[in-house]
Image: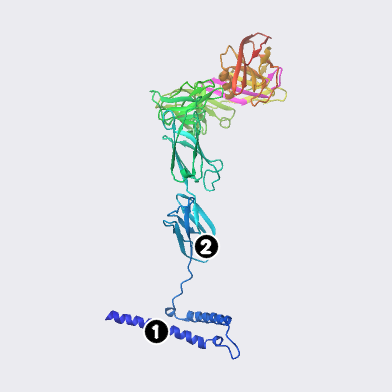
Amino acid sequence: MTQRRHFVYVAAGVLAAIVLIVGVRVWWQVNAPGAASTQPAEKGGAETPASRAENARVDDSALSTALETLPEEMAPPAENPRVLAISGCIRDTFGKPIRGAVVTCAGEDGKDSRSNHEGRYRIEGLPDRIFAVTATHPAYFPEQKALVPAGANRADFTLSVRASLEVQVVRSDTQEPLPQYFVRFEHESESRHSEAREGGLHARVQDPAGRTTLSGLGPIAGTLCVWQQGYETQEIAVSAGELATPPHRITVALEPSHNGLEGIVENTRAEPIPGAYILNDRMSWAGDVPQKACAQTGPDGRFRLEPTNEPKKDILAWHPDYAPNYTTIYPETSPHELLRIVLQGMATVRGRVTLDGEPLERCHVIASFKGENALDQNGQHTDADGMYALSGLPPGLAHVEARVHADDWGGSVLRIAQTAELVEGESTLLDFEVQRPNATLEGRIHATSTMLESVSVKLALETAQAAVQYDVNAETDGAGGAYYRIENVLPGTGILTVEAENGSHSFYRISQHGVTISAGEHAVFDITIGSSCAVAGRVVYRRQFDIVLLLVFEGESAITEHDIASGLVSGEPEQIGLAAGTVVSGGMFSSGLANPTGEYAVELLEPGRYTVVAIGSIDETLSSDRAFITLREEDTVTLNLTLR
């Protein structure tokens, strides 16, 4: 009974409100200002459609003003605004509907919708404006329509699939996965979405299983290209249909090239080491090795490389669990010869560098082996306490060198070295306690029959502290001579080496002189390159040679042309016993002297026994001829050599 009474009260209230609103409207039409305009036209006039419309607008305006003055609880409900929408269909490039695509209207009033199984979507409740509408789906490239009026047009989308290729590369002979290779994919025609643009999608793959995935491709036919050192390049055509059903899987079998070189990386127990990185340069093993590597060993520890055209090349193997090691290959290395690189466990050398008892910061410390800077790039600078630690070194005798910069030393650059026995799995302690000396060595350098334009001086001493080396460049005096000065020299005994040449490269002379320096001494040591012995003659060669050199070595040397080229490139020709030389024809960049007769002359030599070698380069290969001579006082030997 109570509920029925409550319902009657509510109905009566609603009815009363309606009556009140109608009454107000009628009253307003009769009594409000301008109401007369709504009456029929005066006698003699007629109401036109235009006047009726104007009257309606006046009535609506008046009503709105009246309603605004009503109490809030008496105000009528607002009318629903006009509802606008954007709708359409989303399909792929083959006309198939795409389900689950998200369509978004940009802007602060933007809304979104998701397409159904038929690819259809509809976004409602939009204001009357123009939108930028975007359709996205994880498996497709997004697409946007910039100018879409709400409620006016449909916005249909055609999305391009994000195609992908799953690639695995194996060796054709063993079916073992290839852990490192290069891959490129190029579309046959322009694809506005694909990442394979401007020359294709490139990738460098490093994966033990030989797998990679090329993502972000357009559904357009193209070519997959796979290559790696020591293997034949493979090209595979991929159709648009294969790309349209991602992921498309391809297995590529690379065939070993007939002239490729094969090698194996093993430990000291002759066990293969998989996953070792192979580098074309033994000096580049420090830093980001995977990015520098040209190959990587497979599960059987094997790798393949292209043959070399260089005089020789050092192939280095690196693995995080072993010390690096290398082997050397030459142009004549047979492809049937198995290259073998044996890796040992790692050793460490560490210590402290002090100068006058104080820690020396940023002193460069390196380790080298077999008389070569095999691990020069392993060098490390000391910290603020003068401490250093070189890890990952091979066991054995190591030449550890601290290079004191001229600014720290107060004079010329100082290289102070010690020998350390490195043990596998252990850390060897080696300190450098350098005392600042005050000895000075200076002098003038003069050649009796030529103008010197470039002179470098090296002083190598055995001292009480250690073996040290100083390097300076002499200053030419404009009159054909040069002046050198080495400050803060440690007391000791050693060799002063002078490398001098003139601007035409027709003269190159290395002279070595024994010196002894006392503590605090100011020594003056002048050098005259002016001995009376010489060797002269002709080198017969073909005009196709890029460069022809005539080199003179002390004693009877059996050094090969490859070792000669390596010594010249390394910048330490005295290490290979070179005493003098001249350029017969050409230059390092196929420029220089033009000498079709091949005549040469090397003068200012000391009396003694020498090896004379003619060496030439043609088509990136080397040719040489040699002879042995003995020079006596004021003696000139005529010697003709032939390059074939």
Name the residue carrying label 1. Answer: 16
Which quarter of the picture shows residue 396?
top left
Asked if residue 466 lies in the magenta stretch, the reply is: yes
Q: In the depicted view, which residue is nearer to us: 468 or 120?
A: 120
Asked if residue 194 lies in the magenta stretch, the reply is: no
Q: In the depicted view, which residue is nearer to us: 463 or 570?
A: 570
Amino acid at the residue labelled 2: Asn
Could you say where residue 156 lies in the image, as x and y percent from the top left? 50, 57
- Picture mark count: 2
The magenta segment is 445-472
Q: Is the magenta region chiefly helix, strand or loop?
A: strand
Mark 2 / mark 1, whichever is N-terminal: 1
Numbered disc 1: secondary structure: helix
Q: In the depicted view, which residue is nearer to us: 106 or 575?
A: 106
**Separation (CA) of disc 2 from disc 1:** 46 Å
466 over 89 or under it: above or below:
above
Q: How crowded is mark 2: few (under 14 residues within 10 Å), some or many (20 or more)?
A: few
Numbered label attached to residue 205: none
Q: Which residue is depicted at the point 70% across and 25% down?
A: 477
Q: How crowded is mark 1: few (under 14 residues within 10 Å), some or many (20 or more)?
A: few
Name the residue carrying label 2. Answer: 153
487 over 536 or under it: above or below:
below
Which quarter of the picture shows residue 628?
top right
Amino acid at the residue labelled 1: Ala
